[in-house]
Image: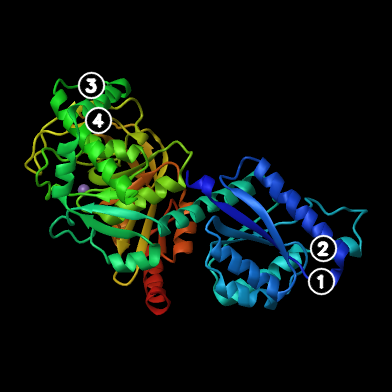
Amino acid sequence: MELKDCEFWFVVGSQHLYGPEVLATVEKRAKEMADKMNASKRLPCRIVYKTTVKTPEDATETVLAANYEAKCAGLVVWCHTFSPSKMWLNGLKLLQKPYLHLATQYNVSIPDKGIDMDFMNLNQAAHGDREHGFIAARLGTPRKIVAGHWKDKAVLDRIGGWMRAAAGARFSRNLKVMRFGDNMRNVAVTEGDKVGVQEKLGWQVNTWPVGLLAERINAVTDREADALVAKYRSLYPFNTKNTAAVRYQAKEEIAMKRLLEEEGCRAFANTFEDLYGMEQLPGLATQRLMAQGYGYGAEGDWKTAALTAVVKAMGEGGSGGTTFMEDYTYELAKGRECTLGAHMLEVCPTIAAGRPKVEVHPLGIGGKADPARLVFEGRPGDAIVLSLIDMGGRCRLVCQDVKVIKPIYKMPNLPVARVMWKPAPDLATGVECWIRAGGAHHTVLTYDVTAEQMADWARIMGVEFVHITKDTTPESLEKELFFSDVAWRLGGK
Ligand code: MN
């Protein structure tokens, strides 16, 4: 529902130089373009023609109105004619919303016989967009730039992808995260500066007592739990006779969801080290909540919990394939190299290849009763893994392209959901690069959101972005990280 709430303002640059007739044509065309872009069905959010900026006052007023309007998730700006950019300077300095510069033009082709100086004055985006681009470069305004014809499918898809990133930024700035228990003792990478993260990303990360959750689990009636167990039975085959264990997970799901809704939280973290008063580590319950769009991070990992929620919101309407994930173990045999990802329990069933099965097995960690969980294989496909780490004074988002494959072993004694993937550019190089960048063992794995969209999101939020691709080499990455570190220490916060 996030994307439906967002609208984007189409703002067109011009000036009074060309007379009222040209300005009337510019406005008419801009409206037509917004209507047709909406009608293309390729944009996840509505684009609304807002105004043609002709004076410095127009630019400033438009920016201030955009900053103020909660529904406005960003500006899409294009210069139909020349639009002198000193006019835009004061306004752009005030801009607090995501900003896309669409370098396009109304017509596809140059009309061979039709072109004269009137045509040139009206259709000079190649001229106007360069003037507009300069001022944003000079000011250092964060922006996305998309060039090409506005009806072109690839152009529309890139605008749409950026809209998802901008909607993700809006979601981030309102995101509340519920913590049950602290981070796992002595673990470094799941730590972080909560005040710094809230300043940068808007995430409000707060703690609720585990004892309160235990009370709320106990307050769920058997009747309520049995109704949910019946729903589980309709969705998943049961590979267990231990219905009591499944019923306890249903109580956990109901209780956690109620608390999350009461507090307006869209993500949560917990830890096996603090399950005081609880009978089982939430497994099936957490998996089910992730499938409903909640972010999750294990071992108190609130950063990954929040990032999972953001990526799920950005991927809304896709296949739904986004999950909390953890790198566990490698296949190093030549020709078969891959990573096995899983978790103790908590992998989101939206990434399942088939129907997940409900199973109950002992859990050696946490010292509690055998928890019910969903067991499945991840589906093959192109995906990315993401890790947000605290570098001290700033966050870095590490992104790696991966190819998820059908697991090459049956692993009948592994009692959890499992995913196998080949990281780019290859396993060994990919691992070297990931470790060089400081990426965590916890990640968000998504099939729905692309690296370009995450780069857009990181730019909007002001977060360092490191992308490991098929073309990355350890040498190039080491240099990139060195220069990036210097730049962020000098200019970042
Ligand atoms: Mn873990």
Q: CA distance from mark 4 to mark 2?
A: 62 Å
Bin the neighbour count of mark 4 within 10 Å (Cα to Cα): few under 14, some 14-19, many 20 and up.
Answer: many
Mark carried by residue 23: 2
Number of numbered labels in the structure image = 4
Bin the neighbour count of mark 1 within 10 Å (Cα to Cα): few under 14, some 14-19, many 20 and up.
Answer: few
- Nearest-to-viewer mark from 4 and 2: 2
Residue in the picture at 41% in, 67% down: 480
Q: Is residue 371 something one can see in this rendering? A: yes
Q: Is residue 419 something one can see in this rendering? A: no
Mark carried by residue 238: 3
Q: CA distance from mark 3 to mark 4?
A: 10 Å
Q: Amino acid at mark 3?
A: Phe
Viewer-side residue, 51 vs 447: 51
Label 2 residue near ligand 1, CB within 8 Å:
no
Q: CA distance from mark 4 to mark 1?
A: 65 Å
Question: Which badge, 4 or 2, is on the more N-terminal residue?
Answer: 2
Q: Quadrant of the C terminus?
A: bottom left
Dot 4 and dot 2 residues touching (CB under 8 Å)? no
Name the element at disc 4: strand
Residue 135, compared with residue 315, is above or below; it is below
Dot 1 and dot 2 residues touching (CB under 8 Å)? yes
Q: Residue 40's quadrant in the figure? A: top right
Residue in the picture at 74% in, 55% down: 30
Mark carried by residue 16: 1
Q: CA distance from mark 1 to mark 3?
A: 71 Å
Bin the neighbour count of mark 2 within 10 Å (Cα to Cα): few under 14, some 14-19, many 20 and up.
Answer: many
Q: Which residue is mark 4?
A: 375
Please indicate whether residue 416 sits to the left or right of residue 2 in the image.
Answer: left
- Nearest-to-viewer mark from 4 and 1: 1
